[in-house]
Image: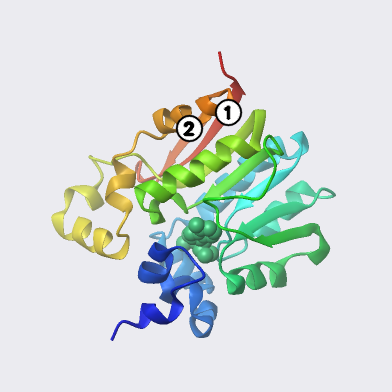
Amino acid sequence: MRLYRYFEGEVPPYLARHFWWAYMWRGLTWFFDTPIIISSILFGQYKTLKHATIEHVSKIADRGRMLQLTCVYGRLTPRIMEQLDPQPLHITDIVPVQLELARDKAVPPEKLLATRMNAENLAYRDDSFATVLIFFLLHELPPEARRKVLGECMRVLSPGGTLVVTEYSHLPKQHIFYRSPVARRILYRAEPFLEPFWNEDLLELLNDLAQPHGKAVEVASHQEYFGGFYRVTEYRLSEGV
Ligand SMILES: C[S@@+](CC[C@H](N)C(=O)[O-])C[C@H]1O[C@@H](n2cnc3c(N)ncnc32)[C@H](O)[C@@H]1O
């Protein structure tokens, strides 16, 4: 039975088809939001990656408006809000139940400006954020959707702004999870868009997408974790030449 058909219609097709069970089914969100499941999905690295992301954000928190592009399970969002205080945090997601979960965790709730949008087509103005944070979204997107989402990031970030990306690293050829055909197969089954993401040159793509907005991108900082399997990268935007 094609259960995903029940979730089709109001979200991008890839989301209903491949991830309905993880993000859209109300009855299961409590399960995915438990620390042990969050940690298992990231091979025990969730806390490390969360702390590393918060550390990056804390250094740039005073630079202006910040957007977290899509919700995440766990306590990342309330911790980011602490760093931004007294500024609010903007957050957007296409799935209502995910926005509800984020709102339930927000302290104080009015400091989380949660809006339902498709990240491929944001309703924010050009140059309206100093920081955009993306935590493990990009590898879940088909290449065309990823292009659109990153294109929107390049549009809404102001020159001088920062895109913080916490994600799988670029193709981890030396890592055991890549070298083992069995592990690779399991990963590709669970993450249908990971392979094209692994092969994408993100900096080159970002510069392609920034150019029409008169912007250019460089890597401001880059740290790898779990033997190079994951990374936190800060991309800094400038006025293009
Ligand atoms: C951030 S990603 C992966 C998060 C990671 N697995 C975790 O929870 O830590 C998952 C979120 O992205 C959202 N999402 C996926 N595609 C989207 C799109 N095009 N627009 C808005 N939200 C989207 C999903 O609804 C979900 O809440």
Nearer to us in this view, 53 or 67: 67
The residue carrying pointer 1 sits among few (fewer than 14), some (14 to 19) or many (20 or more) residues within 10 Å by Cα, namely: some
x, y percentage for residue 221?
A: 53, 29
**Residue 85 in the figure: left or right of residue 1:** right
Tag 2 residue: 209
Please report the residue visible at 62 percent of the width from the left and 63 percent of the height from the top: 75
Residue ID for mark 1: 213
Residue 224, located in which quarter of the rendered image? top left
- Residue at the image point whose x is 23% and y is 40% from the top: 174
Q: Position of residue 241 (x, y in %)?
A: 55, 13
Query: Which image quadrant is residue 106 in?
Result: bottom right
Can residue 129 be seen here? The reply is yes
Percent from the top left, x then y, of residue 142? 36, 53
Mark 2: C-beta under 8 Å from nearest atom of ligand 1: no
What type is the residue that disc 1 sits on? His
Q: Which element type, helix, strand or loop, lies under badge 1? A: helix
For residue 89, side relative to residue 5 (left or right): right
Whether residue 76 can be seen here? no
Q: Is residue 105 above or below residue 126?
A: below
Instruction: State the quadrant of the N terminus.
Output: bottom left
- Cβ–Cβ under 8 Å for marks 1 and 2: yes
The foreground one among 160 and 187 is 160
Badge count:
2
Nearer-the-camera pick, 226 or 207 = 207
Where does residue 111 sit, x and y in percent of width and height?
A: 80, 58
Q: What amino acid is found at the position of numbered circle 2 in the picture?
A: Leu
Q: Residue furthest right?
A: 86
